[in-house]
Each structure stands twice: as structure tokens, then as C-alpha cells.
């Protein structure tokens, strides 16, 4: 009695599965970066709208790594983010708080920390991968 194993078919199947997994993981990371972008935009100080309007997110895949980035592309973004004064600044009083913080300083850091602990944020990846 003998058996034959077609390793080429197995390798093709494995490669296809890996492509699907990476595709779903990238999709989930994009979803998560969009959530972080919207949350940080909602908490950013607002005076002229320049800071709030400069937010963008990107997702890059490099080898086995999938990196997401949210940026505010104006010169004063870091200054407003790290403002450690007690006054939250102009335009924040009319903005509502979210479950991840209050408008003002740390408008990107607070949502990132909150979302990092939020189970639904991480389940986006599981949900996308299971869908295949």
C-alpha cells in the first residue's frame, strides 16, 4: 500500500491562504486607522479648521509587517498636541468629548491609547480574516 502527497497543490493552497490573510489584515488595519483618524480629528483643537482638516492616514505593508499611521500635517500640530497647559485652547469648548477623551491636548495620543484597549478595535482584524 502506498500513498502519494501532492505537495505542489498544498503549496499553492498555502500561498493563496497567505495572500487572503494579508489582504484581510491590511483591510482591517485601514479600518482601524480610519477610526483613529476620525476620533483624533473630533478631539483636535479647532480655531480655523486648518489642524482638523490636515489629518490623514496611511497603511503600508512591508514583508510580514502592516504599519498604519495617522498624521496631522501642519506646523503647529505637535505644539497643540503637547500643550501641557490647563487651558485646552480656542475651539475646544464647543466640541464634545468622546469616549476616548476631551478635546484639546493629546488629541491623537488619547484615542490611540483608548482604541488600543478597545476589544472591538482589535476584533476588526479577526472579523476580516474569518470572512475569507
Image: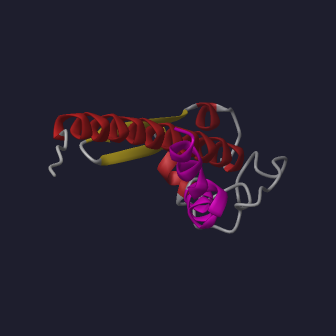
Residue 117 on image: x %, y %? 60, 67
Residue 2 on image: x %, y %? 14, 49
At horizontal 29% and vertical 41% (from top left) the residue drawn is: 14
How many labels were placed on the picture? 0
Main SS of residues in magenta: helix
Using residue 84 as the reference point, say whether residue 39 is left or right of it: right
State whether residue 73 is above or below residue 111: above
- Tell me which segment is drawn in magenta: 109-132
Q: Quadrant of residue 18?
A: top left
Examine the structure image and report whether residue 46 is included in the region drawn in magenta: no
At horizontal 49% and vertical 44% (from top left) the residue drawn is: 29
User: Between 41 and 80, which is closer to the camera in this rendering?
Assistant: 41
User: Can you see residue 31?
Assistant: yes
Using residue 64 as the reference point, say whether residue 93 is left or right of it: right
User: Can you see residue 76?
Assistant: no
User: Between 74 and 112, which is closer to the camera in this rendering?
Assistant: 112
Residue 122 on image: x %, y %? 56, 57
Amino acid at each position: 500500500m502506498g500513498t502519494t502527497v501532492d505537495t505542489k497543490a498544498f503549496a499553492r493552497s498555502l500561498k493563496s491562504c497567505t495572500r487572503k490573510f494579508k489582504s484581510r489584515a491590511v483591510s482591517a488595519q485601514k479600518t482601524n486607522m480610519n477610526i483613529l483618524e476620525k476620533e483624533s480629528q473630533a478631539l483636535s483643537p479647532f480655531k480655523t479648521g486648518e489642524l482638523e482638516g490636515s489629518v490623514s492616514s496611511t497603511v503600508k505593508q512591508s514583508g510580514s509587517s502592516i504599519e498604519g499611521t495617522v498624521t496631522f500635517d501642519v506646523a503647529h500640530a505637535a505644539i497643540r498636541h503637547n500643550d501641557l497647559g490647563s487651558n485646552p485652547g480656542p475651539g475646544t469648548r464647543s466640541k464634545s468629548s468622546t469616549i476616548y477623551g476631551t478635546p484639546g491636548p493629546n488629541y491623537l495620543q488619547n484615542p490611540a491609547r483608548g482604541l488600543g484597549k478597545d476589544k472591538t478595535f482589535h476584533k476588526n482584524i479577526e472579523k476580516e480574516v474569518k470572512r475569507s
